[in-house]
Image: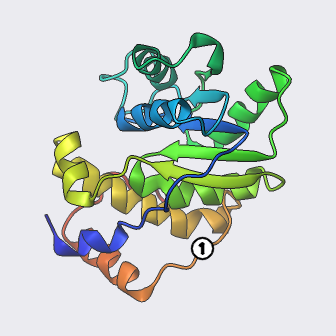
Amino acid sequence: MPAQSRNFWARSGTPTDADVAIGLGSHDLGAATTTADLYRAGLFPVLVFTGGNSPTTAARFPRGEAVHYRGHALALGVPDEAILLEPRAGNTGHNITYSRQVLSCAGLSPTSVLLVSKPYMERRSYATARKLWPEVDVRCASEPLELGDYVKSIGDEKLVLDMLVGDLQRVIEYPKLGFAIEQDAPEDVHTAYENLLAAGFTSRLITP
């Protein structure tokens, strides 16, 4: 694995409790596991699983990310009545906006939200929620794995690095498009980003 990829691996600390949690759908079932674990630990009383499908998830989760996440959480002991479902979202902005609508329809108006995502997506999910839902206190959580262990859990190093590079590009570019708040990226992260681009980890890039 390219050594510079470790420059991207910055996760939040110990999760804190919140009014609700939102489990952000993706190719990584670990986010569903972590959401279930944190529910069982008593950090929140209700959760939303959000996500339809994308090119990287359609084959693995043919019924949609949120539906498969819900089934996994039920198998781990989360009660059905604690789970709300948002099965339409196709990007992170949709995840936040549509989950907010689902919560509102359920009569819930949280003041704090715990976003549970892939480890390398914490910064982008935070920046997106702060832009689209500025009145809530946004916290983040993800599966507590180091980069090497995470790659092993997914089983596809190039996919993880492509996704990681694509996520950082979105952290950089999305504020310019009004999709997220700005965040500072240190110089060593920018250097690592350029090196990984040059090495060919480009399949998840957007056209700015």
Q: What's the residue at 63%, 29% (across, down)?
A: 47
Label 1 sits on a secondary structure element that is loop
Residue 118, position as x, y percentages in the image: 41, 47
Pick the residue in front: 154 or 159.
Answer: 154
Query: In what quadrant of the picture does the N terminus appear?
Result: bottom left
Q: Is residue 5 above or below residue 65?
A: below
Report the side of 123 relative to 33 (left or right). Answer: right
The residue depicted at 27 percent of the width and 51 percent of the height is: 160
Depth order, front residue of 175/136: 136
Residue 71 appears in the rendering: yes
**Looking at the image, residue 25 lies above or below residue 200:** above
Residue 158 showing in the rendered view: no
Q: Is residue 112 above or below residue 106?
A: below
Q: Residue furthest bottom?
A: 187
Left or right of 130 on screen, residue 74: left
The colouring scheme, among rainbow, by chain, secondary structure or one colour, is rainbow
Q: Position of residue 101 (x, y in %)?
A: 78, 29
Q: Quadrant of residue 155?
A: top left
Q: Residue at x 27, y 59 (%)?
A: 146
Single out the residue that lies furthest toward the front.
41
Residue sitting at the far left: 1
Residue flagged by tag 1: what amino acid is it? Gln
Q: Which residue is mark 1?
A: 183
161 vs 23, left or right, is left
